[in-house]
Image: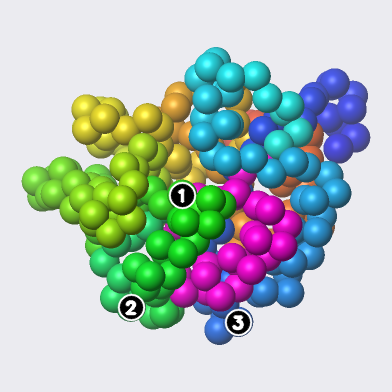
Amino acid sequence: VVLAGLFRVRIQPAILMYHSFDSEGWRYGVEPAELEKQICYLTKHRTFVPLLDIVAWGKGEKLIDQNVVAVTIDDGYEDTYSVFFPLAKKYNIPFTIFLTTDLQKQAKLGNLKRPTWEQLREMKESGLATVEVHGHSHLNFTEALEKGKLEQEIETSRVLIREKLQYEPKYLAYPAGRQNPLVVKKVKEMGFTAACSTSPGPVESDSNPFLIKRIGVDRATPLTLFKLRLSAGFPLYLKLTRLFKQHA
């Protein structure tokens, strides 16, 4: 924060990346009590906007106040409905679920309970949630490409969302952030508007709309670190960290 002041760095739009809101100790989850602390902090210091607003700003299609934040939730778990959704309604938070559409429990998804299509429909019909593509089985997209299964993995997810929720998905998030130039090319060819990565940082106005950065939040993110990642100095911190690693 001090360095940000010295270098006159300004707050930039940010996209948060959550997974589950469980109390079972999964490393990618967030305790419900911590989630509410984070939301209370955001209501005082940021403005919640839909993902599409930040994407449009990044592409130069829309002007927005840069002190904004969008909430994205990867995979889709039952606790998105039981824990996060009530808070979203209480604080009027728009959010995006990047859904792995095979709704069975999976070891790679923490063996956590998944949502039902009825719960997903209720969240979507509230006007707060949009449901977008995260693959069907959470298969690594680079691996899927090598096996000739990438288009099937993406299209199965898109068709299920379209048929179950009467909504045409426009955005995609790469499972576990795995992508390469050929994967990105295929996503563009399939007609998506933008795609989110897992690379850390705020969104910049000249960023690649198919490699959008997000700020990850998980069980190892106490409130102090959460605040740091949303501070004006966080991009500078990331640059200095990368520079240090290169010269270490």
Image coordinates of residue 166 in percent, x first then y, are 31, 51
* First in residue order: circle 3 vs circle 2: 3
Residue 182 seen anywhere in this rendered image of the structure: no
Image coordinates of residue 86 in percent, x first then y, are 64, 68
Label 3: how many Cα within 10 Å (few below 14, some 14–19, many 20+)? few
Q: Circle 3 — which element?
A: loop
Magenta residues (range) = 69-97
Residue 89 found in image quarter:
bottom right
Residue 86 seen anywhere in this rendered image of the structure: yes
- Left or right of 3? Residue 202 is left
**Residue at the spot x=27%, y=50% of the render?**
162
In the image, is residue 108 part of the stretch drawn in magenta?
A: no
Image coordinates of residue 42 in percent, x first then y, are 77, 51
**Residue at the spot x=64%, y=60% of the render?**
88
Amino acid on which disc 1 is placed: Thr
Find disc 3 in the rendering and name its residue: 23
Find disc 1 in the rendering and name its residue: 130
- Left or right of 51? Residue 37 is right
**Residue at the spot x=43%, y=79% of the render?**
112
Amino acid on which disc 3 is placed: Ser
Farthest residue in the bottom direction?
24
Find disc 2 in the rendering and name its residue: 105
**Residue at the spot x=46%, y=49% of the render?**
130
User: In which quadrant is the C terminus drawn?
Assistant: top right
Marks 3 and 2 sit apart, C-alpha to C-alpha, by 17 Å
Q: Which of 118 and 228 lies nearest the eye of the viewer?
A: 118
Q: Nearer the viewer, mark 1 or mark 3?
A: 1
Farthest residue in the left direction?
148
Q: Circle 2 — which element?
A: loop
Marks 1 and 2 sit apart, C-alpha to C-alpha, by 22 Å
- Left or right of 233? Residue 171 is left
- Determine whether label 1 and label 2 are within 8 Å by CB: no
